[in-house]
Image (spheres, grey):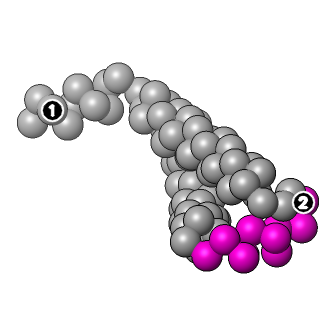
């Protein structure tokens, strides 16, 4: 039962990280557009000007850290016997 639960959690974490990566890539494109076309910096509803680029960059950094932690937790959740059995054969 525990193995099934671990696999379901790993699949859920992978799906969440894939979704966050999709959001991250859209934000990267938006930040690129704001940098190359400065008139778009005023379309950001929360901050205007250069602060729009800075806040988008901070959001990207937070999303990247969350993705890294999700993938790292998947790697750490594997039992050591499972990895030893694969490397031994």
Q: Residue at x 32, y 25 (%)?
A: 81
Callout 1 secondary element: helix
User: Where is residue 30 drawn, in percent x and y?
Assistant: 63, 71
Where residue 78 sits: x, y (%)? 43, 32
Q: In this rendering, would 53 be left or right of 25?
A: right
Residue depicted at 78% across the width and 60% down the height: 49
Distance in Å between CA atoms under marks 1 and 2: 51 Å
**Per the image, is 42 magenta?**
yes
Which region is colored magenta?
A: 37-46
- Sequence-first disc among 1 and 2: 2
* Residue behind mark 2: 46
Dominant secondary structure of the magenta stretch?
helix
Residue at x 84%, y 61% (from the top left corner)? 48
Percent x, y of residue 60: 63, 51
**Residue 84 point in image, percent of width and height:** 23, 26
Q: Which mark is residue 87?
A: 1
Label ID, residue 22:
none
Q: Residue furthest right?
A: 46
């Amino acid at each position: 039962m525990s193995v099934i639960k671990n696999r379901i959690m790993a699949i859920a974490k992978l799906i969440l990280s894939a979704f966050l990566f999709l959001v991250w890539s859209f934000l990267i494109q938006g930040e690129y557009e704001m940098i190359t076309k400065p008139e778009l910096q005023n379309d950001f509803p929360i901050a205007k000007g250069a602060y729009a680029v800075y806040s988008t960059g901070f959001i990207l950094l937070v999303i990247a850290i969350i993705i890294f932690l999700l993938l790292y937790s998947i790697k750490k959740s594997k039992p050591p016997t499972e990895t030893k059995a694969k490397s031994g054969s």
